[in-house]
Image (cartoon, grey):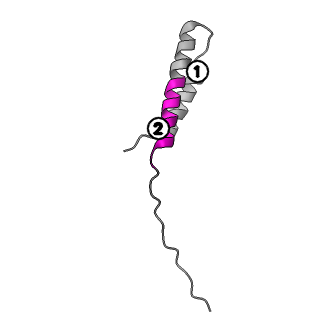
Amino acid sequence: MQTDFTTLRQYLEGAWLQVHGDDELASQLREALDRLIETVAVAECSRPAQPATVLPFPRRARS
């Protein structure tokens, strides 16, 4: 099973939005989440593309 990077990134972005406050800990948490979000985004974009399965489309005979 492959990691669902899109969902993971959305959860991390949601967590980032929940960090309230202007204190040092809140700042450190946002910075750590920023690094995680960036790491996940890089992994998401660098994953090799899965080959597409091309399904044959039935053709109707011309009359």
Residue displayed at 47% across by 60% down:
52
The picture places residue 63, in percent across and down from the top left corner, at: 62, 92
Q: Give the residue furthest to the bottom.
A: 63
Q: Quadrant of the N terminus?
A: top left
- Rendered image quadrant of residue 51: bottom left
* Magenta residue check for 39: yes
**Residue identifier under label 1:** 18
Q: Earlier in the sequence, mark 2 or mark 1?
A: 1
Q: Amino acid at mark 1?
A: Gln
Find residue 63 and name its label: none
Q: CA distance from mark 2 to mark 1?
A: 24 Å
Q: Which residues are magenta?
A: 34-48
Residue in view at x 54 percent, y 18 percent: 31
Nearer to us in this view, 6 or 42: 42
Q: Which residue is mark 2?
A: 43
In terms of depth relative to the viewer, which is nearer, 38 or 29? 38
Where's residue 3, x and y in %? Answer: 42, 40
Label 2 is placed on what type of residue? Ala
Residue placed at 57% from the left, 28% from the top? 14
The outermost residue toward the top is 23
